[in-house]
Image: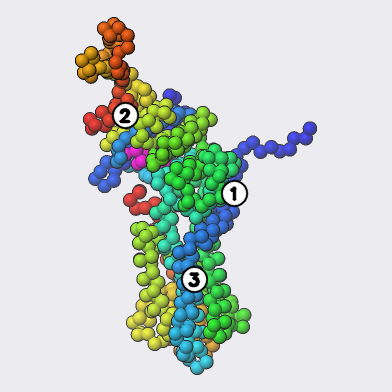
Amino acid sequence: MAGDTAAVEVRGLLKRYGERTAVDGVDLEVAPGEVFALLGPNGAGKTTTVEILEGYRARDAGEVTVLGHDPAHPTPAWRARIGIVLQSVTDLSELTVAETVHHFAGYYPQPRDPDEVIATVGLTEKAGQRTRLLSGGQRRRLDVGLGILGRPELLFLDEPTTGFDPAARRLFWDLVESLAREGTTIVLTTHYLEEAERLADRVAVIADGRILEVATPAALGGRQQAHATVSWTDRDGVRRSVRTAEPTRTVAELAGTFDGEIPDLSVTRPTLEDTYLAMVGEQ
Amino acid sequence: MSTPTTTTTARQPPGTWVLGVRRVRIELLQFVRDRESAFFTMILPVLLLVVFGSAFSGEVAPGVSFSQYFLAGMLASGIVYTTFQNLAITIPQDRDVGTLKRLQGTPMPKASYFIGKVGLALVIYVVQVVAMMAVGVVLFDVRLPTDPFDWWTFTWVSLLGLTCCTLLGIAFSGLVRSGRGAPALVSPVVLVLQFTSGVFFTYDELPPWMQQMAALFPLKWLCQGMRSVFLPDAFQRQELAGSWEFGRTALILSAWAVVAAVLALRFFRWQRRDET
C-alpha cells in the first residue's frame, strides 16, 4: 500500500480517559476501495478509534489522516467526502423516512437522488412512515441511507447490524457489498465474526486498546496453516477424532480401513470465531 | 450543436441561511408532531392565562383588571418559555438522541442548526402571543394598545428579550447533563423568576429583597416593558422607579445578551460529556 494514497492512515494513536488508556498505540492503514473490519470485545477501543477517525473525538497522541486530512480539524468539504453510520442514535423520530432523506440530501454538494437512496436501502414502502415506527432493522437501513447520501468516498459503519434478525442481516450485507463494488472504502466495526468474514478484505483484531493482528479473514491467527480435526465413529460406535496437518491422508487411510463410507465423517478447521476468541482470550 | 455550460464540477451545497430556513421547517414538523412538547410550550401559557384570569377577577389599580396585568406578565413569560426554557430542554434532548452528533457528522454549517432553533422559537412566540391576546380580549375584556408607540415598545422588548433568552437557553443547555433531567432543572428557574419578577403577583407588593434579586435577571425587565404596553401610563407611578425605565430596560437586556453570548460559546456542547 502506498502510504500517501491510503484512505486512512494511523500511526501511534493514543487516547486516554483520565487514568484509563482506551487506545494504546494503534497503527492502521486502509487502502482506497478496501473493506476493513475492526474486531474486538466491548471496551476494546473500537468505537473510540473510529470516532477519532470520524472527527468526533480528540486524540492524545499519534498521527492520523483520513482522506488526506487530519480529522481533528474537520471541514465541511472533508465531511462531504465521508459517510458515518453511528451506533444507537434514535433521533428524527417524528419525521418520515422521505422527509428525513430529502432534507439531509441538502447538506451535500453532490447528493445521490434521495428516492433512489430510499429504494437502495429497501425502504420505498416505508417512505411515508414516521421514523419512530420503523423496526430496528429498518431504522438502521435509514441510518445507512443517510450515510451514503452524499456519495462518500469513505463510509464508517459502527456495529451496523446489532439487533438484526438473520434475514435483515443478509440484506444489509448485500447492500454493503454493492457499495464496496462501486469503490466505496468501508471501515466497519462489528462483533459478529461471520459479518467480518463475509464483508471484509482485511480485519484488525483490537483488544485493550492495542492491535493484535491485521490479516485477511482467511489468514487471521494462522488459520490457513492450522491443523484440521478429522472426526468419525469407529466400529464399536465410539466417536474418534485426530488433529492433523494432513487431513486428506487421514481420510484416505480411514477410507481404506472402512472399505467405503466413513461413519459420521467431518473435517474441520478453526473458524474465524475460534481463532478470534483464542486471540482475545490470551489477553 | 450548441453546448450549454455544463456543470461537471462539484455543485455548491445551499448556504447557511437556506439550510437554516429548511431546518426551521424540520424543527416545526417535529415540534407539532411531538404532542407533549407542543402542549408544554404552546398550550400551557394560554391555559395559565385562563386559570389565573378566572381565579383572580379583582383590580390591581383603578380601571386595571388583574387579567390586564397578568397578560403583560404572561407575554413576557412567553419569551422565556419559547426560547430559554424550550432550548435548555430540547438541546440536551437533541444531544441525547444523537441529533447533534448526526448533524456534526455532516457538512451542514453549524449555524444552520441554531437558525432552525431560533426560527422555531419565533414561530411559537408569534402563535403564543396571538393566542394569549385573543384569549385575553375574548374571555377577560383585556384592552389591546392602540398607540403605535406601544406596539413599537412591544416589538423591541420582544426582539431583545428573544435574543437574550435564546442565548441564555443555549448556554444553559451545556450545563444540563441529560435531556431527561432537563425539565426538572429548567422549570424551577423559570418558575422562581416568574414569582419574583411580578408575573403572578404585582411587583410593587413583593418584599424589597425579592424585587432587588429579580431586577438582576431579564424577566423582570421584560415584564416591566410589557406592562408599559398593556397598562395605562398612569400605572408607571406604581413602578418602583416611578417610570417605565425604557433606557434601563434596553441596557440591561442588551448586557444580558452579550454575557449570554459569551456563556453560550463557552458552555454549548455538541456531545454528551461522557463522549469527548
| Depth check, front residue: A90 or B248 | A90
Q: Look at 39% across and 28% down and name the residue there.
A: A197
Callout 3: helix, strand or loop? helix
Q: Which residue is mark 3?
A: B43
Residue B158's x, y, as percent? 52, 72
**Label 1, residues with CA under 10 Å away: few <14, some 14-19, many ≥20:** some
Residue B160 visible in the snapshot? yes
**Label 3, residues with CA under 10 Å away: few <14, some 14-19, many ≥20:** some
Q: Is residue A51 on the magenta stretch?
A: yes
Which range of residues does the magenta coloring cover? Answer: A45-55
Do callouts 3 and 1 mark residues in contact (Cβ within 8 Å)?
no
Q: Look at 35% across and 41% down and name the residue there.
A: A48
Q: Which residue is mark 1?
A: B14
Q: Which residue is mark 2?
A: A273
Query: What subunit carries mark 3?
Result: B
Residue pushed farthest right? B1
Residue pushed farthest front? A236
Mark before the other along the chain sequence, 3 or 1: 1
Q: Are marks 1 and 2 on the same chain?
A: no
Label placed on residue B99: none
Quarter the N terminus of chain A occupies = top left
In the displayed structure image, the side of residue A141 where residue A190 appears, left or right: left
In the displayed structure image, the side of residue A124 where residue A251 appears, left or right: left
Front label number (1 vs 2): 2
